[in-house]
Amino acid sequence: MTEPTPHGGPPLPRVPDRRQLDRLASILAPVRRVTQPKVLGIEHIPHRPVLFAGNHSRYALLDLPVMMGELWTCRRIAVRPLGEHAHYAIPVWRDLLTMCGMVRGTRANVRALMRDGQNILVFPGGTGEVFKGRGHDYQLIWKERLGFARLSIESGYPIVPFAAVGAEEMYHVVVDREMPIAAQVSALMRRLVGLPLPPIPRGVGLTMLPRPERLYFWFGQPVDTSRYGGAGDDNAAARAVRDEVRAAVETGIRMLLAERERDPQRRLLRRLWHEVHEVPQLAAHDPDAWLVTRAFEAWNEQGAAGAAAWMSRWVQLSDPPGWPDAGIWRGRDRAVARLEEVTAGLGATSAELTEARTIRDRVLAAFELRDASGSPTSPSGFVAVFEVDADQILRMAVFRDRTAALDAIERREQQPI
């Protein structure tokens, strides 16, 4: 689906709706469990449309979608990233970017987004930062780019500087275009497809799997562009705004690097150790019930999609018997979509867990759905039976009363729930 642009220009991809963004959070949930992003300064983002400007990490494969997911789950902020023109020369890649709400980075498109009051995300360093070579970690390569500053001044859009740290260490650069042979190949690629040769990396061992680094994000105080009275063609004003934003981003990078150095959970093993050793008594004597409890906590923090990290890819959800349009929903995406549909229909924003314990080889969990004011929905009380294996939820069967749930556990050998 697309939305028209003014003056007969090419159509813009529609902004992803709430369900699509929740689905993105669901897909990213396993990545979030590993990277455990730490976000600083998110309270600085004003409750109005802004333009985000910050550093582009090498490759930007994980930190950008994770940051977009954090903005959505923590503040319900949907952003429209601006893409380099060369991205759209690659058929499958351009389609994936469009699905995430990315827009071709033209001035006409930015003006259209600003007129529509959308949040915009720009990387002034562009592909120069994405394809950084060895020895250039966290360096800004903004050159003399002023476009984002001019357009923000023109529309009076505040600019929120941001910084991201962690993704640069996920890969080690083996070959970059500063090597003689690679430089020739890079020049040829730039002529053919408009992109230089990307650095050739390795991740874990000799593989392309990214190292499980923790991700850190920082958002600074917004830069007020309205003080320049809409004079986007004023070179001095544009340079002043750009330099102010760049200085803020560089400060944010230094802050995050320092934060990472003193973070006791920077390393994956320390994060796992923390999860294993600093857990309530329930985790020790009933680990399956503890896992279900964690899934409910994630649900309350990030919505139904937040619980996806605790579900198997092939999880099966069964509706309560007699529920309208009752059915069985197979697969994580379909199960999450059904949970979102039902809870939204009931006006529920959280689930209060009142009981979680293992009975035989199933976990019985009783919970009440509550709305934004904390009041019970109608209906509110449910009992679910979970099958858990290998730290994942394999099946969920929901019932309206405890007796029906206990009967299902008793029947498990004859008829799997």
Image (spheres, grey):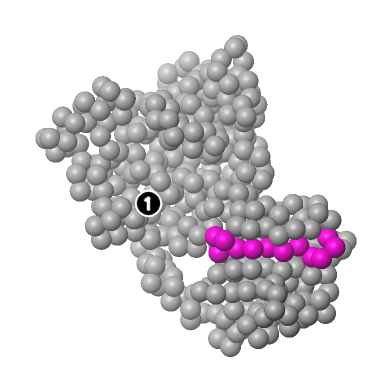
State the image coordinates of residue 359 (x, y, percent, origin top left): 68, 85
Q: Which of these two is toward me, 360 or 251? A: 360
Residue matched to label 1 = 167
Q: In which quarter of the image is residue 266?
A: bottom left
State the image coordinates of residue 170 (x, y, percent, origin top left): 33, 54
Secondary element type, mark 1: helix
Q: What stretch is highlighted in magenta?
A: 312-323
Please state, as top left, top right, bottom left or bottom right, where the N terminus lies in the image.
top right
Q: Does the magenta stretch include residue 139?
A: no
Tell whether 127 sits left or right of 392.
left
Residue lying at 49% horizontally and 33% vertically, measured from the top left: 95
User: Residue reaching furthest left?
Assistant: 180
The answer to whether residue 245 shows anywhere in this view is: no
Q: In which quarter of the image is residue 146?
A: top left
The answer to whether residue 142 shows anywhere in this view is: yes
Residue lying at 57% horizontally and 52% vertically, measured from the top left: 25
Please state, as top left, top right, bottom left or bottom right, where the C terminus lies in the image.
bottom right
Q: Which of these two is toward me, 164 or 333? A: 333
Residue type at mark 1 is: Ala
Q: Callout 1 environment at 10 Å: few (<14), some (14 to 19), or many (20+)?
A: many
State the image coordinates of residue 105 (x, y, percent, origin top left): 47, 26
Residue lying at 39% horizontally and 44% vertically, measured from the top left: 60
User: Residue reaching furthest top?
Assistant: 7
Q: Which of these two is toward me, 29 or 250? A: 29
Residue lying at 39% horizontally and 30% vertically, measured from the top left: 90
In this view, 227 is above or below 357: above
In this view, 311 is above or below 59: below
Tell whether 384 sits left or right of 10.
right
